[in-house]
Image (tube, rainbow, N blue to C red):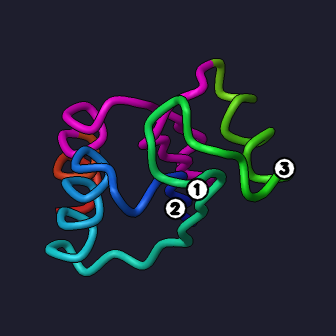
């Protein structure tokens, strides 16, 4: 299962969502805080703690439970998705 921690107003997150849609891959989306980068207000404490458990406080953050992969950085995520799911 793919899980994407993201913010609706983030262009980097949009890039990842577009790639997921292009590939036709199902995923679960989490919105741990309001738009505003690292300064956005936390709206969901549980998913916010899950986001930070990856070692950073930033989005996008992808968790691929099937392949035991976690990563930040939209370009890295897009490259991973292309290599793994195309």
Tell me which label, 3 or 1, sits earlier in the chain: 3
Residue range in magenta is 56-79
User: Answer yes or no: do the residues labelled 1 and 2 have beta carbons within 8 Å?
Assistant: yes
Identify the residue position indicated by label 3 in the image: 45
For the C terminus, the image quarter is: bottom left
Q: In the picture, residue 31 is in which quadrant?
A: bottom right
Q: Residue at x 75, y 52 (%)?
A: 47
User: Answer yes or no: do the residues labelled 3 and 2 have beta carbons within 8 Å?
Assistant: no
Tell me which label, 1 or 2, sits earlier in the chain: 2
**Magenta span contains residue 77:** yes
Tell me which label, 3 or 2, sits earlier in the chain: 2
Mark 1 surroundings: few (<14), some (14-19) or many (≥20) residues within 10 A: few
For the N terminus, the image quarter is: bottom right
Element under disc 3: helix
Identify the residue position indicated by label 2 in the image: 2
Q: Which marked residue is nearer to the observer: mark 1 or mark 2?
A: 2
Q: Spatial distance from mark 3 to mark 2, Cα to Cα?
A: 20 Å
Element under disc 2: strand
Q: Is residue 18 left or right of residue 74?
A: left
Where is residue 50 drawn, in percent x and y? 75, 42
The residue nearer to you, when weighing 73 against 66, is: 73
The residue nearer to you, when weighing 21 against 12, is: 12
């Amino acid at each position: 299962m793919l899980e994407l921690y993201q913010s609706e107003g983030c262009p980097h997150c949009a890039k990842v969502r577009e790639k997921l849609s292009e590939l036709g891959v199902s995923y679960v989306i989490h919105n741990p805080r309001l738009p505003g980068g690292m300064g956005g207000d936390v709206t969901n404490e549980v998913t916010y703690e899950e986001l930070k458990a990856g070692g950073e406080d930033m989005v996008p953050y992808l968790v691929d439970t099937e392949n035991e992969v976690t990563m930040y950085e939209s370009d890295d995520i897009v490259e991973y998705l292309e290599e793994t799911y195309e």
